[in-house]
Amino acid sequence: METIRIPNSATYSPVSLTDLMFTAPLATRLLLGATLPGRLVQAAAAGAYAGCVLSDWASRRGVRKIDFLGTYGADIKHMDEMPPSQREEDVQRYSEELMRIHEPVVRTREVMAADINERLTTYIAGITGQRVETSSSVREMTLARLIMPFASGSCDVLSGDIAVFRNAGIFEAHILAHEFCHRKGYLKELEAQALAYLALSRSRDPQLRQSALAERVYRNLRVLDNDDPARYGELLEDTPLDGPVLDDFRRLRPPDQRPNPFANAMRELYDSRMKLTGQNGLSDYDRGFTNFLYTYESAVKAGRAA
């Protein structure tokens, strides 16, 4: 099988090169009272960043990406709306399965990330006939955390630098898989959501599979709650979720969550940015993602997809 290795050199830097470019002048001004050293660091970081980006771009040119419409019978512009009754059935069915297979995650993030990256690589290769090998390095903090306070993680799509900002419990494996999809060249959020889910949900590893099921349940709940945290809590109480799993779901959307004007403004800006790049907006994370699965699974039942 053909193998393409994307270097992702920027991901091995001790500090995010993007953060260095933005913060070096200010940091040296505050610490040393001069901006020149910071400017030199900034220039060096920018040069290193550009080199990493060009190297990754050259490697990605040979990647054969999945044709979503041809493979799954659905893509970002071709999906059927999932009926509310089907969403409710989905929540019940996959909540029950989630609790049946659930086991505590004992692996470190580093080990989990490597396992997820390999699983994703293998799944995609089974469709395209091509292994796209990438870094499994993950940061815990970048400036993106301040810019997108509503996000659980981020990926610099040019350099492949990934950060996961908090311990997301049962959801973490899917978050990592989603960000790794970006690193492999799938830049649209719905495609990353779908590939992460399909790769993990078909894994024999219960700790990967349970994360995919949790994501599916959560995203259906987010559509059903009509953007009402209190309603989300009510829907959650009607599920068979229990114990630490239920706690993870509650942490994602607490009922007493206070409005954050800055976070809301950045959310709207990010939604607009997604639409400008041919996506449907933030709804691709939940409504789009679950509609995609509904359309794909309907196509499988009709014999139009495998």
Image (cartoon, grey):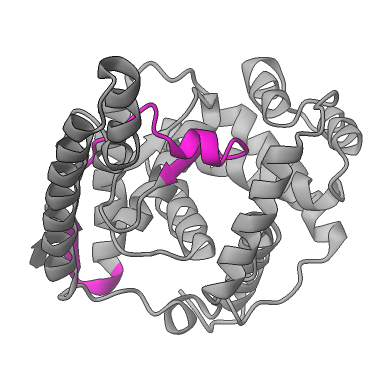
Question: How far across and how far down the image is residue 39, in percent?
Answer: 21, 39
Question: How far across and how far down the image is residue 253, in percent?
Answer: 74, 31
Front-lying residue, 245 or 230: 230
Front-lying residue, 48 or 70: 48
> Taking 58 as reference, is 156 left or right?
right
Q: Quadrant of residue 301?
A: bottom right
Residue 130 in magenta? yes
Q: Looking at the image, is 249 positioned above or below residue 264?
A: above
Instruction: Mark yes or no: residue 55 visible.
Output: yes
> Taking 73 as reference, is 231 left or right?
right
> Which image quarter is the C terminus in?
bottom left
Front-lying residue, 26 or 82: 26
Q: Quadrant of residue 35?
A: top left
Task: Say how many tags the image has.
Answer: 0
Q: Looking at the image, is 151 positioned above or below residue 281?
A: above
Q: Looking at the image, is 45 positioned above or below residue 189?
A: above
Instruction: Mark yes or no: residue 210 visible.
Output: no
> Taking 18 as reference, is 78 left or right?
right
Question: How far across and how far down the image is residue 195, in percent?
Answer: 43, 59
Q: For the point 49% across and 78% down, which residue is it?
A: 305
Question: How far across and how far down the image is residue 199, in percent?
Answer: 40, 53
Q: For the point 69% across and 39% down, which residue is it?
A: 262
Q: Quadrant of residue 247?
A: top right
Q: For the point 54% across and 63% down, which residue is it?
A: 190
Front-lying residue, 152 or 243: 152
Residue 216 in magenta? no
Q: For the point 69% across and 35% down, which residue is it?
A: 96
Q: Residue furthest front?
A: 33
Q: Looking at the image, is 299 positioned above or below residue 265?
A: below
What is the magenta range? 127-154
> Which image quarter is the N terminus in?
bottom left
> Taking 130 as reference, is 249 left or right?
right
